[in-house]
Image: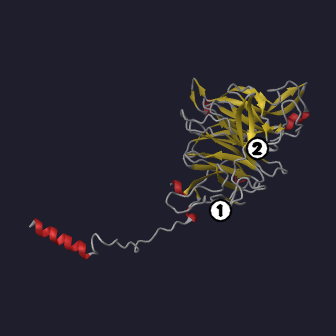
Amino acid sequence: MAKRSLFWAALLLVGCGDFWGRKTDLSFIEVPQYDAALVAYVPLLPYWEGFEGPVDICIGYDELIYVADSVAGQVVCLDQAGRRLASYALPGVHAVAQDRRLDLLVAAPVDTVIGGQRYRLDALFRLRLQSPEGYGLAHATVVSRQVHPFYFKSTFALSDTLVRFRRIAVRGDNSYYVTRNGPDNDPLKFGGPDDAVLLFDSQDRWQEAIVVQTSTEVRTDFFQGVWGLVTPARPPQSPFVSQSPNFWVGLTAPGVALKVHAILRQEGEQGSFYTVSTAWQQGDTSLADGFLATPGRFLRPEGLALTGGARPYLLVADAGRDSVYVFTLSGLEGVYPPTGSGLRRPVKVSFGGTGSGPLQMRRPTALAHARQILYVVDSGNRRIMRLRLTTDF
Protein backbone atom coordinates (compact mmCIF):
# COMPACT_ATOMS: atom_id res chain seq x y z
CA MET A 1 0.00 0.00 0.00
CA ALA A 2 2.85 2.42 0.89
CA LYS A 3 4.63 1.63 -2.39
CA ARG A 4 1.42 2.34 -4.36
CA SER A 5 1.00 5.77 -2.69
CA LEU A 6 4.57 6.76 -3.49
CA PHE A 7 4.07 5.71 -7.11
CA TRP A 8 1.00 7.93 -7.60
CA ALA A 9 2.70 10.91 -5.90
CA ALA A 10 5.71 10.63 -8.18
CA LEU A 11 3.47 10.33 -11.23
CA LEU A 12 1.60 13.52 -10.34
CA LEU A 13 4.83 15.50 -9.84
CA VAL A 14 6.29 14.34 -13.14
CA GLY A 15 3.03 15.13 -14.88
CA CYS A 16 3.24 18.71 -13.63
CA GLY A 17 6.41 19.34 -15.61
CA ASP A 18 9.42 17.02 -15.65
CA PHE A 19 9.84 17.26 -11.89
CA TRP A 20 13.66 17.62 -11.75
CA GLY A 21 14.40 18.82 -15.24
CA ARG A 22 12.38 22.03 -15.82
CA LYS A 23 12.06 25.25 -13.77
CA THR A 24 8.64 26.28 -12.62
CA ASP A 25 7.19 29.14 -14.68
CA LEU A 26 6.63 32.08 -12.28
CA SER A 27 5.62 34.63 -14.90
CA PHE A 28 2.05 34.57 -13.66
CA ILE A 29 3.15 36.30 -10.40
CA GLU A 30 2.89 40.08 -10.67
CA VAL A 31 5.92 42.06 -9.49
CA PRO A 32 4.73 44.59 -6.87
CA GLN A 33 4.80 48.18 -8.11
CA TYR A 34 5.63 50.67 -5.35
CA ASP A 35 4.08 54.13 -5.53
CA ALA A 36 6.29 56.82 -4.00
CA ALA A 37 3.20 58.98 -3.54
CA LEU A 38 2.10 56.60 -0.80
CA VAL A 39 4.98 57.83 1.38
CA ALA A 40 3.85 61.11 2.92
CA TYR A 41 3.09 62.91 6.15
CA VAL A 42 -0.57 62.53 7.05
CA PRO A 43 -2.45 64.62 9.64
CA LEU A 44 -3.42 63.17 13.00
CA LEU A 45 -6.68 65.00 13.49
CA PRO A 46 -7.99 66.87 15.32
CA TYR A 47 -5.09 69.26 15.70
CA TRP A 48 -4.52 70.81 19.10
CA GLU A 49 -6.18 74.20 19.33
CA GLY A 50 -7.15 76.65 22.06
CA PHE A 51 -3.86 78.57 21.97
CA GLU A 52 -3.62 82.34 21.56
CA GLY A 53 -0.15 82.67 20.10
CA PRO A 54 2.02 79.54 20.26
CA VAL A 55 5.62 80.12 19.19
CA ASP A 56 7.74 77.25 20.53
CA ILE A 57 7.40 73.62 21.61
CA CYS A 58 9.52 70.93 23.20
CA ILE A 59 9.12 67.26 24.03
CA GLY A 60 10.51 66.94 27.53
CA TYR A 61 12.67 64.24 29.05
CA ASP A 62 9.64 63.60 31.26
CA GLU A 63 7.89 62.80 27.93
CA LEU A 64 5.38 65.59 28.41
CA ILE A 65 4.89 68.37 25.87
CA TYR A 66 5.54 72.02 26.63
CA VAL A 67 4.28 74.92 24.50
CA ALA A 68 5.33 78.56 24.82
CA ASP A 69 2.22 80.69 24.16
CA SER A 70 3.55 84.22 23.81
CA VAL A 71 0.20 85.98 23.50
CA ALA A 72 -1.39 84.14 26.43
CA GLY A 73 1.81 84.65 28.43
CA GLN A 74 1.95 81.02 29.50
CA VAL A 75 3.98 77.87 29.28
CA VAL A 76 1.41 75.12 28.76
CA CYS A 77 2.02 71.46 29.65
CA LEU A 78 0.16 68.70 27.78
CA ASP A 79 0.30 64.95 27.80
CA GLN A 80 0.77 62.99 24.59
CA ALA A 81 -2.99 62.79 24.10
CA GLY A 82 -3.19 66.58 24.06
CA ARG A 83 -4.80 66.96 27.47
CA ARG A 84 -3.75 70.15 29.26
CA LEU A 85 -2.19 69.30 32.58
CA ALA A 86 -1.00 72.68 33.85
CA SER A 87 0.23 76.12 32.85
CA TYR A 88 2.72 78.63 34.21
CA ALA A 89 2.22 82.37 33.76
CA LEU A 90 5.21 84.13 32.19
CA PRO A 91 4.20 87.18 30.11
CA GLY A 92 5.73 87.22 26.65
CA VAL A 93 7.36 83.79 26.93
CA HIS A 94 8.83 82.84 23.56
CA ALA A 95 11.16 79.84 23.96
CA VAL A 96 11.05 76.61 25.95
CA ALA A 97 13.29 73.56 26.43
CA GLN A 98 13.85 70.92 29.12
CA ASP A 99 17.18 69.60 30.35
CA ARG A 100 17.88 66.08 31.56
CA ARG A 101 17.35 67.10 35.19
CA LEU A 102 13.74 67.87 34.18
CA ASP A 103 14.10 71.63 34.70
CA LEU A 104 12.48 73.89 32.13
CA LEU A 105 14.58 76.56 30.43
CA VAL A 106 12.45 79.40 29.08
CA ALA A 107 12.96 82.84 27.56
CA ALA A 108 10.71 85.80 28.37
CA PRO A 109 11.03 89.56 28.91
CA VAL A 110 11.32 91.03 32.39
CA ASP A 111 10.99 94.58 33.71
CA THR A 112 14.27 95.85 35.15
CA VAL A 113 15.09 99.17 36.82
CA ILE A 114 18.45 100.65 35.77
CA GLY A 115 19.54 104.08 36.98
CA GLY A 116 16.03 104.84 38.15
CA GLN A 117 14.53 104.00 34.73
CA ARG A 118 12.40 100.97 33.97
CA TYR A 119 13.40 98.87 30.96
CA ARG A 120 12.08 95.63 29.52
CA LEU A 121 14.92 93.20 28.88
CA ASP A 122 14.91 89.62 27.67
CA ALA A 123 15.86 86.94 30.18
CA LEU A 124 16.47 83.22 30.53
CA PHE A 125 14.60 81.48 33.34
CA ARG A 126 15.15 78.08 34.92
CA LEU A 127 11.92 76.58 36.25
CA ARG A 128 12.30 73.71 38.70
CA LEU A 129 9.36 71.33 38.38
CA GLN A 130 10.17 69.22 41.41
CA SER A 131 8.95 70.47 44.79
CA PRO A 132 7.98 68.96 48.18
CA GLU A 133 4.36 69.10 47.00
CA GLY A 134 5.00 67.08 43.87
CA TYR A 135 6.31 67.18 40.32
CA GLY A 136 5.01 69.17 37.38
CA LEU A 137 4.46 72.61 35.95
CA ALA A 138 1.82 73.30 38.61
CA HIS A 139 4.63 73.10 41.20
CA ALA A 140 7.21 75.12 39.23
CA THR A 141 9.43 77.73 40.87
CA VAL A 142 12.04 80.04 39.33
CA VAL A 143 15.49 79.05 40.62
CA SER A 144 17.65 81.04 38.20
CA ARG A 145 17.26 84.11 36.00
CA GLN A 146 19.80 85.48 33.52
CA VAL A 147 18.85 88.96 32.29
CA HIS A 148 20.43 90.32 29.13
CA PRO A 149 23.13 91.66 29.07
CA PHE A 150 24.13 91.13 32.70
CA TYR A 151 25.03 87.44 32.36
CA PHE A 152 28.26 88.50 30.62
CA LYS A 153 28.82 92.21 31.37
CA SER A 154 27.89 94.87 33.91
CA THR A 155 27.23 97.77 31.51
CA PHE A 156 23.98 98.51 29.70
CA ALA A 157 23.07 100.14 26.37
CA LEU A 158 19.65 101.13 25.02
CA SER A 159 20.10 98.66 22.15
CA ASP A 160 20.01 95.86 24.75
CA THR A 161 16.26 96.44 25.09
CA LEU A 162 15.88 95.14 21.52
CA VAL A 163 17.78 91.89 22.03
CA ARG A 164 15.76 88.65 22.06
CA PHE A 165 16.59 85.05 22.83
CA ARG A 166 15.04 82.89 20.11
CA ARG A 167 15.63 79.20 20.81
CA ILE A 168 17.21 77.01 23.48
CA ALA A 169 18.74 73.58 22.79
CA VAL A 170 20.14 71.33 25.52
CA ARG A 171 23.22 69.13 25.14
CA GLY A 172 23.56 65.68 26.67
CA ASP A 173 25.60 67.03 29.62
CA ASN A 174 22.91 69.64 30.49
CA SER A 175 24.88 72.57 29.13
CA TYR A 176 22.88 74.37 26.46
CA TYR A 177 23.00 76.65 23.44
CA VAL A 178 20.83 79.75 22.97
CA THR A 179 20.25 81.71 19.77
CA ARG A 180 20.12 85.48 20.21
CA ASN A 181 19.10 88.36 17.91
CA GLY A 182 19.61 92.09 18.20
CA PRO A 183 20.48 95.27 16.29
CA ASP A 184 24.12 95.78 17.32
CA ASN A 185 26.19 93.38 15.28
CA ASP A 186 29.63 94.88 15.53
CA PRO A 187 31.90 91.80 15.16
CA LEU A 188 34.48 93.35 17.50
CA LYS A 189 32.05 94.04 20.33
CA PHE A 190 32.76 92.46 23.71
CA GLY A 191 30.60 89.36 24.09
CA GLY A 192 30.15 89.15 20.34
CA PRO A 193 27.50 90.57 18.02
CA ASP A 194 23.87 90.51 19.15
CA ASP A 195 23.20 87.88 16.48
CA ALA A 196 24.96 84.96 18.12
CA VAL A 197 24.80 81.42 19.43
CA LEU A 198 25.63 81.39 23.14
CA LEU A 199 26.85 78.51 25.27
CA PHE A 200 25.80 78.22 28.93
CA ASP A 201 26.99 75.52 31.30
CA SER A 202 24.65 73.31 33.31
CA GLN A 203 24.65 75.89 36.13
CA ASP A 204 23.44 78.70 33.81
CA ARG A 205 26.84 80.37 33.63
CA TRP A 206 27.63 82.02 30.30
CA GLN A 207 30.64 80.40 28.65
CA GLU A 208 31.06 82.00 25.25
CA ALA A 209 29.53 83.39 22.10
CA ILE A 210 30.38 80.80 19.47
CA VAL A 211 33.08 81.81 16.99
CA VAL A 212 33.10 79.87 13.71
CA GLN A 213 36.18 78.89 11.77
CA THR A 214 35.38 78.63 8.05
CA SER A 215 37.71 77.37 5.34
CA THR A 216 39.06 80.90 4.84
CA GLU A 217 38.61 82.87 8.07
CA VAL A 218 37.53 83.00 11.69
CA ARG A 219 34.18 84.75 12.08
CA THR A 220 32.46 86.16 15.13
CA ASP A 221 29.52 87.33 12.98
CA PHE A 222 28.65 84.10 11.19
CA PHE A 223 25.18 83.73 12.72
CA GLN A 224 23.34 86.55 10.95
CA GLY A 225 19.68 86.56 11.89
CA VAL A 226 20.14 83.27 13.74
CA TRP A 227 16.91 81.67 14.96
CA GLY A 228 16.28 77.93 14.61
CA LEU A 229 18.40 75.61 16.74
CA VAL A 230 18.64 71.90 17.54
CA THR A 231 21.19 69.49 19.05
CA PRO A 232 21.39 65.69 18.68
CA ALA A 233 20.41 65.19 22.34
CA ARG A 234 16.76 64.20 22.57
CA PRO A 235 14.34 62.21 24.74
CA PRO A 236 13.68 59.61 25.96
CA GLN A 237 15.89 59.71 29.03
CA SER A 238 18.51 56.96 28.74
CA PRO A 239 22.26 56.30 29.00
CA PHE A 240 22.34 56.55 25.19
CA VAL A 241 21.33 60.21 24.89
CA SER A 242 23.80 61.83 22.49
CA GLN A 243 26.72 63.65 24.10
CA SER A 244 27.68 65.37 20.86
CA PRO A 245 28.41 69.11 21.16
CA ASN A 246 27.42 69.69 17.52
CA PHE A 247 24.30 71.63 16.59
CA TRP A 248 22.23 72.87 13.65
CA VAL A 249 21.09 76.46 13.16
CA GLY A 250 18.74 78.38 10.90
CA LEU A 251 19.65 81.90 9.77
CA THR A 252 17.03 84.45 8.72
CA ALA A 253 19.05 87.46 7.49
CA PRO A 254 17.92 88.37 3.93
CA GLY A 255 21.44 88.53 2.49
CA VAL A 256 22.44 85.01 3.55
CA ALA A 257 22.24 82.48 0.70
CA LEU A 258 22.71 79.26 2.72
CA LYS A 259 20.49 79.51 5.77
CA VAL A 260 20.68 76.10 7.46
CA HIS A 261 24.03 74.87 8.76
CA ALA A 262 25.51 72.09 10.84
CA ILE A 263 28.10 73.46 13.27
CA LEU A 264 30.73 70.98 14.43
CA ARG A 265 32.81 71.31 17.57
CA GLN A 266 36.31 69.94 17.08
CA GLU A 267 39.38 69.53 19.24
CA GLY A 268 42.76 70.90 18.22
CA GLU A 269 46.19 71.39 19.73
CA GLN A 270 45.14 74.74 21.20
CA GLY A 271 41.72 73.64 22.42
CA SER A 272 38.25 73.28 20.95
CA PHE A 273 36.88 75.25 18.03
CA TYR A 274 33.75 75.30 15.86
CA THR A 275 33.57 74.73 12.12
CA VAL A 276 30.81 74.75 9.50
CA SER A 277 30.06 71.37 7.95
CA THR A 278 30.53 71.26 4.18
CA ALA A 279 29.68 67.56 3.85
CA TRP A 280 26.42 68.18 2.00
CA GLN A 281 25.46 66.37 -1.18
CA GLN A 282 24.31 69.00 -3.62
CA GLY A 283 23.03 69.35 -7.18
CA ASP A 284 23.10 65.74 -8.40
CA THR A 285 19.47 65.04 -9.34
CA SER A 286 20.24 61.34 -9.70
CA LEU A 287 20.47 61.35 -5.90
CA ALA A 288 17.44 63.47 -4.98
CA ASP A 289 14.95 66.05 -6.22
CA GLY A 290 16.03 68.70 -3.73
CA PHE A 291 18.93 69.65 -1.49
CA LEU A 292 19.45 71.37 1.83
CA ALA A 293 22.43 73.36 0.55
CA THR A 294 20.69 74.96 -2.44
CA PRO A 295 21.30 78.73 -2.27
CA GLY A 296 18.08 80.64 -1.58
CA ARG A 297 16.26 77.49 -0.52
CA PHE A 298 14.85 79.02 2.69
CA LEU A 299 13.52 82.38 3.78
CA ARG A 300 13.04 82.10 7.55
CA PRO A 301 14.05 78.71 8.98
CA GLU A 302 12.77 79.44 12.49
CA GLY A 303 12.14 75.85 13.57
CA LEU A 304 14.48 72.85 13.41
CA ALA A 305 14.12 69.30 14.71
CA LEU A 306 15.88 65.96 14.45
CA THR A 307 14.14 62.61 14.32
CA GLY A 308 15.40 59.57 16.17
CA GLY A 309 16.22 56.10 14.95
CA ALA A 310 19.16 54.60 13.11
CA ARG A 311 18.79 57.01 10.19
CA PRO A 312 17.65 60.37 11.58
CA TYR A 313 16.33 63.25 9.50
CA LEU A 314 16.61 67.00 9.81
CA LEU A 315 13.28 68.84 9.67
CA VAL A 316 13.08 72.55 8.84
CA ALA A 317 10.07 74.83 9.42
CA ASP A 318 10.31 77.83 7.10
CA ALA A 319 8.11 80.61 8.49
CA GLY A 320 8.67 82.61 5.31
CA ARG A 321 7.44 79.91 2.95
CA ASP A 322 4.80 78.40 5.26
CA SER A 323 6.29 74.95 4.74
CA VAL A 324 8.07 72.10 6.49
CA TYR A 325 10.96 70.36 4.74
CA VAL A 326 12.56 66.98 5.47
CA PHE A 327 16.20 66.09 4.69
CA THR A 328 18.63 63.27 5.25
CA LEU A 329 21.69 64.24 7.29
CA SER A 330 23.69 64.26 4.06
CA GLY A 331 21.47 67.06 2.77
CA LEU A 332 19.18 65.17 0.39
CA GLU A 333 15.52 66.15 0.50
CA GLY A 334 13.20 63.32 1.43
CA VAL A 335 13.14 60.11 3.45
CA TYR A 336 14.79 56.83 2.59
CA PRO A 337 12.43 54.53 0.65
CA PRO A 338 11.12 51.41 2.39
CA THR A 339 13.18 48.25 2.09
CA GLY A 340 12.19 46.23 -0.95
CA SER A 341 10.43 49.12 -2.65
CA GLY A 342 12.82 49.20 -5.59
CA LEU A 343 13.26 52.95 -5.18
CA ARG A 344 16.79 54.31 -4.97
CA ARG A 345 16.36 58.00 -4.20
CA PRO A 346 14.84 59.55 -1.07
CA VAL A 347 11.10 60.11 -1.33
CA LYS A 348 10.11 63.77 -1.05
CA VAL A 349 7.69 64.26 1.86
CA SER A 350 7.96 68.02 2.46
CA PHE A 351 4.60 69.75 2.78
CA GLY A 352 2.94 73.10 3.35
CA GLY A 353 1.51 76.16 1.68
CA THR A 354 -0.26 79.19 3.08
CA GLY A 355 -3.68 78.47 4.55
CA SER A 356 -5.51 76.65 7.30
CA GLY A 357 -6.06 73.27 5.64
CA PRO A 358 -4.76 70.00 7.10
CA LEU A 359 -1.38 70.32 5.36
CA GLN A 360 -1.26 74.11 5.22
CA MET A 361 0.05 76.59 7.76
CA ARG A 362 0.69 80.23 8.51
CA ARG A 363 4.13 81.01 9.93
CA PRO A 364 5.35 77.69 11.32
CA THR A 365 7.79 78.74 14.04
CA ALA A 366 8.91 75.54 15.78
CA LEU A 367 9.05 71.76 15.45
CA ALA A 368 9.35 68.76 17.72
CA HIS A 369 9.50 65.03 17.01
CA ALA A 370 8.89 62.06 19.29
CA ARG A 371 7.45 58.56 19.03
CA GLN A 372 7.31 58.94 15.22
CA ILE A 373 5.00 61.96 15.51
CA LEU A 374 5.92 65.37 14.10
CA TYR A 375 4.63 68.42 15.96
CA VAL A 376 4.43 71.74 14.10
CA VAL A 377 3.74 75.05 15.84
CA ASP A 378 1.40 76.66 13.30
CA SER A 379 1.64 80.07 14.92
CA GLY A 380 -0.58 81.99 12.50
CA ASN A 381 -3.41 79.49 12.84
CA ARG A 382 -2.90 79.26 16.63
CA ARG A 383 -2.65 75.49 16.67
CA ILE A 384 -0.27 72.57 17.05
CA MET A 385 -0.30 70.28 14.02
CA ARG A 386 0.43 66.58 14.51
CA LEU A 387 1.50 64.39 11.60
CA ARG A 388 2.99 60.99 10.95
CA LEU A 389 4.70 59.31 8.02
CA THR A 390 2.59 56.66 6.34
CA THR A 391 5.51 54.24 6.61
CA ASP A 392 5.57 54.67 10.41
CA PHE A 393 2.05 53.35 11.03
The answer to whether residue 102 is above or below residue 1 is above
Mark 1 residue element = loop
Residue 295: give its label. Answer: none
Residue drawn at point x = 78 percent, y = 55 percent: 295
Tell me the kind of residue under disc 1: Ser
Residue depicted at x 77% and y 34%? 210
- Does any portion of residue 63 appear in the rendered image? yes
Residue 365 higher or lower than 200, as above or below? below
Q: Residue 110: x and y, percent?
A: 79, 32
Residue at image coords 50%, 68%: 33
Task: Tell me if residue 319 comes above or below residue 133 in the rendering.
Answer: below
**Quarter of the picture holding the N terminus:** bottom left
**Which x, y percent locates residue 213?**
79, 38
On residue 227, the disc is 2
Residue lying farthest left? 1
Query: Could you tell me the amino acid type at mark 2?
Result: Trp
Closer to us: 119 or 2: 2
Give the crowd class for mark 2: few <14, some 14-19, many >=20 residues within 10 Å.
many
Q: Nearer the viewer, residue 232 or 56?
A: 232
Rendered view: 12 above or below 338: below
Q: Which residue is mark 1?
A: 286
